[in-house]
Image (tube, rainbow, N blue to C red):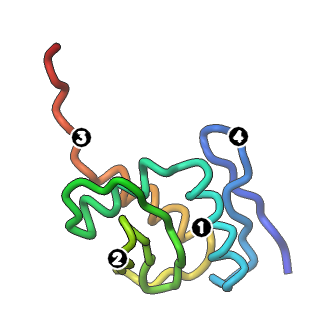
Amino acid sequence: MFILFQYDIFSSIVFMTTGSLTTEISSRICSHMNHGHKEAIKAYARQYGGIENPQEAKMISLTSLCMEIEVDGKVIQISFDHQLHDSEDAHRTLVSMLKAIPKAPAQNP
């Protein structure tokens, strides 16, 4: 078995690929997202969870089928468009989902 380290654009270790999406990998991904990408989690809640104006959002679980996010005290599930195979697939999918979210128009001062 091999381990492949994946790096994000900020050069921090994101996920380690070991061939499957285990509970340990889920915890590592959630921890990474909760510490470094809080706005992305809110964006997932808005776009894919239908939460209009999330104040607090925390990724609590990631499985091969969905992510669970606690948003303002309520747990929501957001399904993926395919079954995730490993942490590399999870990383690509989360990034793709984020990039697919329309950007808010700039507001004039």
Label 2 and label 4: CA atoms lie apart by 27 Å
Query: What amino acid is found at the position of numbered circle 3 in the picture?
Result: Lys
Q: Residue at x 64, y 58 (%)?
A: 32
77 sits to left or right of 47: right
Where is residue 95 shown, x and y percent of the image?
45, 56
**Residue indicated by mark 4:** 11
Task: Find numbered disc 2 in the image and state the secondary structure of the residue it sits on.
Answer: strand
Classify residue 85 by image quadrant.
Answer: bottom right
**Residue indicated by mark 2:** 78
Q: Nearer the viewer, mark 2 or mark 4?
A: 2
**Mark toward the start of the polypeptide (2 vs 1):** 1
Label 2 and label 1: CA atoms lie apart by 14 Å
Q: Residue at x 23, y 64 (%)?
A: 51
**Mark toward the start of the polypeptide (2 vs 3):** 2
Q: Residue at x 35, y 75 (%)?
A: 74
Q: Mark 4 and mark 3 in contact (Cβ < 8 Å)?
A: no
Q: Which mark is residue 103?
A: 3
Query: What amino acid is found at the position of numbered circle 1 in the picture?
Result: Cys
**Residue indicated by mark 1:** 30
**Mark toward the start of the polypeptide (2 vs 4):** 4
Label 3 and label 1: CA atoms lie apart by 24 Å
